[in-house]
Image: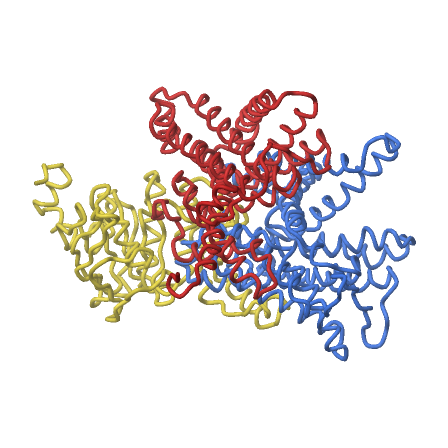
Amino acid sequence: MKPSTVFMSYTRNDLTNFVILMGLGFAVVPFVVQTDYWYSSILIPWLCLSLAAVGQQIVMGYAGQLALGAAGFMAAGAFALFNLELRLPFMPFPFNLMISGLIAAFFGIIFGLPSLRVRGIYLMVATLAAQFFIIWMIDKFGWFKNYDTSGIITAQDIVIFGREFTSPFEMYLVVLVTVTVLTVLAINMTRGSTGRNWMAVRDMDIAAESMGISLLRTKLQAFAISAFFCGVAGALFAFTYLKSMEPVAFDIKLSFRILFMVILGGLGTINGAFIGAAFILLFPVVLNTLGNGVFHGMIDATIISSIELVVFGVLIIVFMIYEPLGMAKLWDSIKAKLAPQSTLEQAQEKQQRL
Amino acid sequence: MHISGWPMTEFLFFIEVVVAGLLAGTMYSLVALGFVLIYKASSTFNFAQGAMVFFAVLSFVGFMELGLPFVLAFFVTILLMALLGFATERLVLKPLMNQSEDTLLMATIGLGFVLEGLAQAVWGVEVRRLDLGIGDFPIQWIIDSTGLFISALDLTAGLVAAVLIIGLALIFKYTKMGLGLRAVADDPGAASSIGIPLGNIMLLVWTAAGIVALVAGMMWGARAGVQFALVDLALKALPVLIIGGFSSIPGAIVGGLIIGASEKVLEVYVGPYFGGAIEGWAPFVIAIFFLLWRPEGLFGEKIIRRV
Amino acid sequence: MNIEQNTDVVVPARNFPVGGSILEVKNISLSFGGVNAITDTSFKVLEHEIRAIIGPNGAGKSSLLNCINGIYRPQEGTISFRGKPLGRISPNIVAQIGISRTFQNLALFKRMSVLDNILVGRKLHMSSSFLSVAVQLPSAMREERKNREKCEEIIQFLEIAHIRDTPVGKLPYGLQKKVELGRALATEAEMLLLDEPMAGMNVEEKRDMCRFILKVNDELGTTMVLIEHDMGVVMDISDNVVVLDYGKIIGDGPPDEVRANQEVIDAYLGVAHD
C-alpha cells in the first residue's frame, strides 16, 4: 500500500469540514436565510470572531504560545482600516483591509518578542500589555479617531471597485469571501512545513531547535500571522457588525471570549475555532431566548449574563479535566464511535494493538 | 531651600507621589501574596485571584446588606472563602494534578469566570458603596508636620496591608504550619509521606488567600465602590508577580511596592505628555522589561532547564 | 570486533572507513551553580566512526552531548567541528552545521503523528516560505512531496510503517525511541549524537536498534556519538570508547583497550574516590 504522500491524515478533517461548511455558506445560506437579523446578528459576527479565533488558534493552539491580546490586535486592525479608508479612499477596499492586517501583524511582532524568553503565564502577562497599550493608544491619540469629539466613530461604507456592499446580505458575502480565503491559507499553513514548525515548537521546543528550527523566527512568525488574522477579523468586525466603533468594544473581555473560543472549540484545530466561536456566540442567544420564553422575563437580563459567565467557566474547567482538546476532539470521538470503521482503519488499529 | 536643583515644593510633591504609589502598591502586594501562597501550596498559577477579590468583597457587602454586623460579615465571608478554596482544591486542582501548567492556568481562568458570574448572580450587578468610616482626604497632622498631603484611606489601607503581609510572612516563616507549607512547595509527595497534613495546609493557604482577597477588596471598594472593575484592577498583581517571582513572599511585597510607586511616578511625570491614563498599561510594560532582564524575578531562583 | 557473534547482525565491509578527526572537544568545563558537571575534558571524534561515551550515572555524559549540541554553554574550553570552533551558538545553528541528535528522556513532538515528527527532521531541507506554503505554490508542493517520500523511506527502513499516522504520545517507549532515531536520521546530518538510544529496550529491540545504527553508519558514513549503558552493545558496535567519571575522562580508546584499563574497572566496580 502506498500511502498518499501529500496530505497529512492527521488534520485532513479540517479541510473536509471547512469545505462542507463554506459550501453551505455560499450555496445554501443565501437561499434559505432571508431575514437581516440572521445575517447581521448571527452569521457576520460568527464569521468575524471565527477568523479572530483562527488567529488565536495559530499562536496558541499551533505554536503553543499562551497569548491573551487578540482583541488588542483586532482593535489595531479596525482602526487601521478606518484610517486607511479615511486617508487613502482611492485605494481599493481589499488592499486597505490587507494593510490593516499587516499593521496588526507589526504589533504582533513587537508584543511577541517576550515569547523568546518566557512562556506560560509570564507570556500571558506580557501579551496583556499589548491589549492595554493598543486600546490606550487609540483612546488617547485623537488622530486615530479623526479627532471625533464623541470618541465613537462610524465605519465607512464598504465599496469594492465601485460597487457598494451595504445591506446585511452583501456584507455577509464580503465577510464570507474574506474568511474563506484566509482560512484556506491558514489550513494550508498548518498542514504544511510552516505549521509543523509551530507544532514542534509547541510540543518540545528544545528538540525543535535541535532539528534546525529557529525559535526566534518561528515564534515571531506565529505571532505576526496570528495578529494579521486578528487584525483583519477586527476590521471586518468593526465595518460589518459594529459599524460605529470605540476602542472599548475591543477590551479585555473580548480577548477572553476569543481565548474561550479556542479552548472550548479545541486547541490545535482550525475547526475548533469555528465551533468555539459558534458556541460562545450562540449560547447567550439561546440562554436569553430561554430566559424570555420559559420564564417570561421573570429573570433579570443581568442575571442571565452572569449565569453565562458561570457556564463558560464551568465548561472550561470540565473540558480541561476531561477533554483538553475541546469540542472538535469530542466531535471526532463521537463520530468515530458512530461511524462504521473502514477496514483499513481496523487493520491499522489491530496492528497497533499488537 | 533646594535639593539638587529642585524647589522644595516640587520635591515634596514628588515625595507625595512616591508615598501614594507605595501605599497603593501595598494593595498589589496583598493580592500578589494570595497568588504566591496558592502557588507555593499547589504549584498552580491561580488566575482566579482577581475574581476572588471581587467575590469576597461583594459577598461581604451582601452579608452586611442582609443585616449582619461588620465583624460577623467579615468572618462569614472568610469562612465562605475557605469553603470555596476547599471546593476548588477538590473539584478543580485535584483532577488536574498531573496536567501541564498551562492546562491548570486555563482551568483557573475558568474558575475566575465562575466566581465573577456567581457573585453577580447572587448579589446583583449594581455598584455598591462600602463605607469603612475612613475618609479619602489628607490627614491634617501630617500636613502640619511635614507638608505632605497623604490620604487617610491610602494610609490606612497601606498600614492594614503591611500588617497583614508581615503577619502572614511571619506565620509562614516561623510556625510549624509554615515549615509544612515550604515542604509542600518543595515536594508535595515527599511532604505527605513524612506525615505533613497536606489537607490542612491547603485549607490554611486558601483561607489566607481568601483573607487577603477580602481585605484588598474592602480597601479598593471603599475608594471606588464595590464593582466588577476590581477584577481588572487585581490583574495588576500579575506584573507584580513577574517582578517579584511567583514563589517568593518578599518578592510579592517588593514587587508590589515597585509597581505601585513606578506607575504613580510615570503617571504624574510622564503621563501628561501622552494624554494620561498610562497607569493601565505601564505596570505591564515595566513587567516586560523586567522579563527581558531577569525572567525568574527578583527573588525567584534561576531555572535551569534539564534536558 | 565480533558483531556477528553477539548481535546476529551481518556487517558488510564498510563503505566509509574511519577517517581523521571531525569533532574536537578541547578542555571544556561546565558547572551548574558551583557543581561541576564536566571538568577539563578533551577528546576527538573521528569521521565515520561510531564512538561510545560510557560512565556511571551522573558522570556528565548527557551534559557533554548538550554542550556539543549548544543547549549548554561550557564555561571554559572550545568545541570545534571540522576545524571550526563552534563558539556561543544555539542548537539550531549546530543543526545547520550538520550535527543532529536524540535525547535521553525522549523529546518527541507528542501531539504530532510519527510521520510529522520525522518530517520536522527534514526542516533544513525545506526552505519554502510560509507564503508559498499558504498559497500552495507548485514549488512548495514539490518540496513537500519530495521530503514526504524521503520520510516514507526512513519509516520503511525503521519498520514503523504501521504507526506512521499515530500521534507519538500514544506509542510505547521502545517505538518512541525508534521514532526519535528516525527524526534524527531524517536530518541527514553528518554526525548524530544519540543519548541512550537503547535505554529501556529488551534484547530483541536492542538488536534491531544496533542493526539500524550500523547500517546507517555503513551506508551513509554518518559519524555516531552514542551514550549507552549496555556494555555488551558498546563493545560490539563502537570503534572507540570514551569513559567519563565524575566529569573527567578516565579512558579513551578502542573497546578492548578500554576494557582492560584499571581505572575504568575501578570506576565501574566502585572503588572509593579520594
The colouring scheme, among rainbow, by chain, secondary structure or one colour, is by chain
Note whether C194 is above or below C130 in the view shown: above
Judge from the rendering whether residue A101 lies leftward or rightward of residue C164; answer left or right: right
Quadrant of the image occupied by residue C219 = bottom left
Residue C79 seen by the camera: yes
The image position of residue A113, as x and y in percent, is 49, 61
Is A253 in front, or is C241? A253
Which chain, by letter, is red? B
Tell me which residue sits at (59%, 41%) in the image. B136
Tell me which residue sits at (68%, 67%) in the image. A142
Note whether B57 is above or below B266 in the view shown: above
Is B278 in front, or is C95? B278
The image position of residue C72, as x and y in percent, is 30, 55
Note whether C60 is above or below B119 in the view shown: below
Quadrant of the image occupied by residue B253 = top left
- Quadrant where the C terminus of chain C sits is top left
Is C4 in front, or is B177? B177
Judge from the rendering whether residue A337 lies leftward or rightward of residue C216; answer left or right: right
Residue C170 seen by the camera: no
Judge from the rendering whether residue A122 lies leftward or rightward of residue A140; answer left or right: left
Residue furthest bottom as drawn = A90
Which chain, by letter, is blue? A
The image position of residue B63, as x and y in percent, is 66, 24
Which chain, by letter, is yellow? C
